[in-house]
Image: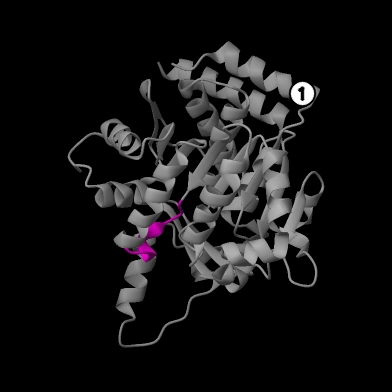
Amino acid sequence: MPDRERILQALKSLSKGTRARMLLGFDAFVDLIVRPIRTGSAIYPESYYERMESLGRFMIERSGRNGSLELDIMRRKLGGNAPNVAAALECFGVSADLIGPFGEEEVDPVFRRLEERGRLFSTGNPGLSYALEFADGKIFLAMNEGNNFIGWDLIRRRVGLERLLELARASSLIFLVNWSELPDATSIFRGFLEEILPALERRLPLVVDLADCTRKGIPQLLELLQVIRSMAALAEVTLSLNQNESDRVCRALRVPIERSEPERAMLVREDLGIAAVAFHRRDESHLATAAGCCSRRTILNRPVLLTTGAGDNFNAGLGLGSLLGLPPADRLFLAGMVSGHYVERGTNASLPELIRYIHDMWVHEERQR
């Protein structure tokens, strides 16, 4: 069970300021958050396609014919796993050094808020992603642009190995994210394994997020998992997986599908030999460590304003828990709270907002008992 007072005291300690820095990369997108219109128009939308199935039926019925679909643009925002994680953690005072495609000639204005506390090292132009929001999930229509060309050689040329080592040595936390959408991402993970992590004086917390890895084959996934296995000796690795990703990893590692979610998380952690494995899904989340597996159910039937970036905020909460030195159950709870606030309010939580949200959540849970 999470310890309420310990979590709140840890969060309140951040109000005095923190010198923590993080290094993360390597993707960047400009996200257009859109809702597909069922009837009406963007000027006067009468109804939206609320669930994926309803839009799927519309498209199937148009097979062999033509059809049109209007999208209502709700928001233009920074996107990509790394920028979303950085935006969440910077709200708690953690500075970020980001590597990714933020603009070739100049930084795209959508990312400039990240320069208020951190530094951006650009590798090219950002991708553009239409994020279709539904009540039961989201679909990204992505044009990857500069993300398609990022690899370890490009990063070494643009940033420089000495600068990379300087950034890593100054960091308290490292995020390696969005392996799926970067064609040469495995080279980046291997570069960190071979050239960065061995040069550090201490084992840092390192959070890995694969993103929806169905576009890459099982051999590619197994190659990456072997790299992650090797990182276990050099860093405190946490592998964070949503439902699609956990199913894919379990299939690759031949973890029996009939086992419970906590058991599967434990088996993945044991196979890889890393510090922790998180499974997070819409209705529950689990965090497996050497001490066992803690679980938490998500309170459903609460307002959902924005889901694009929810997993990134969950990972930001995991990372924040590591920085604060919290035990697994507290880290899992904090991850759920950071993500929950984002989904319900549609924005990253500030420190006072997160503390207030946690208080409100505890009151709600006590009333439900």
Quadrant into which the C terminus falls: top left
Q: Position of residue 119 (x, y in %)?
A: 77, 51
In the displayed structure, would residue 110 be above or below residue 125?
A: above
Residue 52 coordinates in the image, percent (x, y): 38, 60
Is residue 289 visible in the rendered image? The answer is yes
Picture quarter with the N terminus: top left
Which residue in the protein does label 1 denote? 15
Q: Is residue 136 left or right of residue 129?
A: left
The image position of residue 155, as x and y in percent, is 64, 62
Closer-to-camera residue (300/268)? 268
Query: Up-down: is 308 above or below 349?
Result: below
Indicate yes or no whether the magenta region holds residue 338. Answer: no
Pointer 1 local density, CA inside 10 Å: few below 14, some 14–19, many at least 20: few
Question: Residue 106 lies in what quarter of the image?
Answer: bottom right
**Secondary structure found at label 1:** helix
The part of the chain drawn in magenta is: 210-217
Identify which residue is drawn at 54% across, 39% down. Answer: 206
How many marks on residues?
1
What amino acid type should be assigned to the residue bearing mark 1? Answer: Ser
Q: Is residue 44 visible?
A: no
Q: Residue at x 44, y 37 (%)?
A: 301
Magenta segment, prevailing SS (helix, strand or loop): loop
Residue at (61%, 64%) from the top-left corner? 32
Whether 214 is among the magenta residues is yes
Q: Nearer the viewer, residue 353 or 229?
A: 229
Q: How far from the left and from the top, in percent, is residue 34?
A: 56, 63
